[in-house]
Image (cartoon, grey):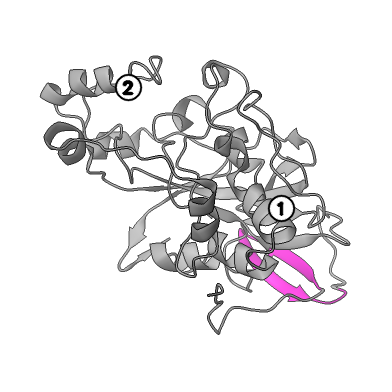
Amino acid sequence: MGVGIPSGFPPARVADVAIRDERIAAIEENLSDSADHVIDTEGKIVASGFIDIHTHSNFILPSNPKAEGKIRQGVTTEVVGNCAFSVAPELPEKVEVLRRYLSVSAPWLPVEETNFAEYIDAWPDLAVNTIMQVVHNTLRLMAMRILVRCMSKEDVRRIASEPTATVGSDGPCVSPYGVTGQGKPHPRLYGTFPRLIGRYARDLGLLTLPQALHKMTGMAATALGLVDQGVLREGFASDVGVFDADGIIDEATFDEPHTYPSGIVAVIVNVVQVVDGEHHTDALPGHLLRRRGSALQ
């Protein structure tokens, strides 16, 4: 069974993309309007920024605002607080339990009593957009056992080609320096999204390039209720990734996990360029996305 792309999502075409006031202003051939900044994307793929729908970055991002491990993959939005643990809410009687739980894998992480409102108010400026969720760590960690089963390569390939599966790194947003550069984390923290495109789509042919991109953009945005992300369309958010379809691939390994992927040309978050080739511009234009009525904005 192949991965389907619902009707209504624009097909690939050759065009220029204009961005104004954090929005896609126009997508046309041979745009003649002048611009303050131009990125040469000839021969490259220009896509909506990738959405990491399953992360553990809520502990990491405040101390790693440049978010290099993810932004250099083309990720422009991190969804946090959707798995086994989170920073908030942490009741007084739960703090020590969570601290012990994290002491082996991340002993440097701060674990303090807080409520969700205080946590949101203290969220800093970041390079990526963030979506917060209140997690079920209290139920999972305090009242249930956590069972772990390792997947095989065949499991991963089957899931990659599953029509309803989106893409998540299941990992925090780290960088190869500072406290997050310590130890040897799973290489997926630096390569989940380039691997789906370069390995599973391009090299193995388990799905097409448009299908892979849809899993990481439009499908994820629809699942989250993001009404103005996931597609390059006039009026939508100006989160954009540019990559070389022939060169994109993950480079991180279990021996050398703190390694950026190849093939990412540029990444733009809210009209600001954050990745320029091999360089991070030090910009922190990400927004904390909040629910407005029935949609996230």
Q: Amino acid at mark 2?
A: Leu
Q: Is residue 234 above or below residue 147?
A: below
**Is residue 247 shown left or right of residue 147?**
right
Q: Is residue 184 above or below residue 263?
A: above
* In the foreground, 143 or 30: 143
Residue to which mark 2 is pinned:
102
Q: Residue at x 32, y 22 (%)?
A: 102
* In the foreground, 244 or 116: 244
Q: Residue at x 16, y 40 (%)?
A: 139
**CA neighbours of label 2 inside 10 A, class few (<14), some (14 to 19), many (20+):** some
Residue to which mark 1 is pinned:
198
Secondary structure mostly seen in the magenta stretch: strand
Quadrant in the picture for residue 236: bottom right
The magenta-colored residue range is: 15-30
- Helix, strand or loop at label 1? It is helix
Residue 259 picture location, percent across and down? 68, 30
Q: Is residue 230 above or below residue 149?
A: below
Residue 22 on the magenta span: yes
Q: Is residue 246 above or below residue 61?
A: below
Could you tell me if residue 146 is visible in this image?
Answer: yes
Residue 144 on the magenta span: no
- The tag on residue 229 is none
What is the quadrant of the C terminus in the image? Answer: bottom left
For marks 2 and 1, give the one nearer the viewer: 1
